[in-house]
Image (tube, coloured by chain):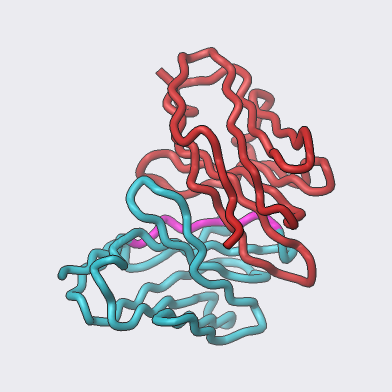
Amino acid sequence: EPEVTQTPSHQVTQMGQEVILRCVPISNHLYFYWYRQILGQKVEFLVSFYNNEISEKSEIFDDQFSVERPDGSNFTLKIRSTKLEDSAMYFCASTGGAGGATEAFFGQGTRLTVV
Amino acid sequence: SQQGEEDPQALSIQEGENATMNCSYKTSINNLQWYRQNSGRGLVHLILIRSNEREKHSGRLRVTLDTSKKSSSLLITASRAADTASYFCATSYTGANSKLTFGKGITLSVRP
């Protein structure tokens, strides 16, 4: 079964450093997303991406965040200057988009720890 | 807030029993999806129900949707210890592929 893959599974970084989280969505999907989950809390939407541009973003997704689809397969989330409060599990997701509502498939997540 | 809310927050049952989890939301939706998350792991998609559907089945899972009450329920029949996990409902409010808004989740413990 096709799946969304994320790398790395765990990243530790120092405060103020830049991090790039990587995702390979399901190949024929059209919509891509990033969500995050702070430990013990609910999953929160960060940004959605369609047709090579951001289609929606939340208040969390400020100027420190950016997304990119540099080639036909990868989808990345960059945090420019990490803060302690950026520590969370980050999930990438994708949906098909064709013919109406489709399931959103999530990757296994990248656990980001900012120290 | 448009966030969904699940109840109960925690549920503990014996293996073999049925588990019923409920989710409520506040505004009109396009679809509602249920996910499972094992501790510290990724989100596994369980089932999607569209706003014009009332009930769906998938194996031991049964999902209902009542748009008049803005609520959904997830029933797991004949539970197993492996069903122990957190369960989340997530709603899509606008387009078919718009963002998902998650509830806080229900922690299900199935005792062997």
Q: Residue A106 at x, y = what percent?
A: 55, 53
**Residue at left offset 48%, top offset 81%:** B58
> Toward the viewer: B108 or A29?
A29
- Residue B35 sits above or below residue A17 on the image: below
**Residue at left offset 53%, top offset 20%:** A82
Q: Residue A57 at x, y = what percent?
A: 69, 42
From the viewer's perspective, tell me whether residue B86 is left or right of residue A96.
left
From the viewer's perspective, tell me whether residue B14 is left or right of residue A10.
left
Residue A11 part of the magenta-drawn span: no
Looking at the rendering, which quadrant does residue B106 occupy?
A: bottom left
- Residue A1 sits above or below residue A73 on the image: below
Residue B100 part of the magenta-drawn span: yes
**Residue at left offset 54%, top offset 14%:** A17
**Residue at left offset 53%, top offset 46%:** A44
- Quadrant the N terminus of chain A occupies: bottom right
Looking at the rendering, which quadrant does residue A105 occupy?
A: bottom right
- Residue B43 sits above or below residue B66 on the image: above
> Toward the viewer: B73 or A110?
A110
Q: How many marks?
A: 0
Write down the region rendered in magenta.
Answer: B98-106
Q: Residue A73 at x, y = what percent?
A: 73, 42
- Quadrant the C terminus of chain A occupies: top left
Rendered red, the chain in question is A
Rendered cyan, the chain in question is B
Looking at the rendering, which quadrant does residue A58 occupy?
A: top right
